[in-house]
Amino acid sequence: MLNKIVLASPVTQSREAVKQLITQDNHGQEPTEMPSFYRLTGEMVLVLNGRKDAYYVTTPKTCSCPSATFRPGPCKHSKRYFPQSMREAATQESIRPKLPAFKPFDSLPSEEKAAAGVA
Ligand SMILES: [Zn+2]
């Protein structure tokens, strides 16, 4: 029986699995929309695929996308999310994943309205 998990080759995750993961990270709050990528750690990113039905697991050296499987070297996801400088800085990155769905505080539409109008 083959039931070993091979950590050396990441496995594409279903959209639903990633949603559950984000919900857990958000203390039980479901994401309002699924992000195009979700950084798990400094060295692992989930990247939404072209059909938007699954997430590739991307690390600086490997990726679960078809391109990475059939071609040597880092695929476009590894290159995009782990440019050379970032690979070196990865260990210094915060443990908390970034939340790409969130805009900076001062650019929220409601904040702009408040600043321009009523107050
Ligand atoms: Zn890839």
Image (cartoon, rainbow, N blue to C red):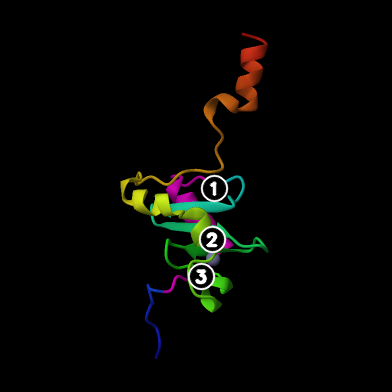
- Do we see residue 72 in this rendering? yes
Q: Residue furthest left?
A: 92
Reading the chain from its start, which is encountered first: label 3 or label 2?
A: 3
- Do we see residue 41 in this rendering? no
Residue at 66 percent of width and 18 percent of height: 113
SS label for mark 3: loop
Q: Residue furthest top?
A: 119
**Nearer to us in this view, 27 or 90:** 90
| Location of the C terminus (image quadrant) | top right
Mark 1 Cα shell of 10 Å, populated few (<14), some (14-19), many (≥20): some
Reading the chain from its start, which is encountered first: label 1 or label 3?
A: 1
The answer to whether residue 19 is above or below residue 92 is: below
What is the spatial separation of the Cα atoms under label 1 and label 3, in whole angstroms? 25 Å
Tell me if label 1 and label 3 are in contact, CB under 8 Å. Answer: no
Q: Position of residue 37 (x, y in %)?
A: 54, 53
Foreground tag (1 vs 3): 3
Ligand 1 image position (quadrant) = bottom right
Mark 2 Cα shell of 10 Å, populated few (<14), some (14-19), many (≥20): many
What is the spatial separation of the Cα atoms under label 1 and label 2, in whole angstroms? 25 Å
Report if the beta carbon of the residue with label 3 is closer than 8 angstroms to ligand 1: yes
Report if the beta carbon of the residue with label 1 is closer than 8 angstroms to ligand 1: no
Q: Say what amino acid the circle numbered 3 marks.
A: Ser
Residue at 46 percent of width and 53 percent of height: 83
Magenta residues? 9-30
Instruction: Give the side of residue 28 with respect to residue 49, left or right.
Output: left
Q: Which mark is residue 64?
A: 3
The residue that label 1 is drawn on is 30
Q: Position of residue 14 (x, y in %)?
A: 56, 66
Q: Position of residue 56 (x, y in %)?
A: 53, 64
Tell me if label 1 and label 2 are in contact, CB under 8 Å. Answer: no
**Membership of 50 in magenta stretch:** no
The residue that label 2 is drawn on is 77
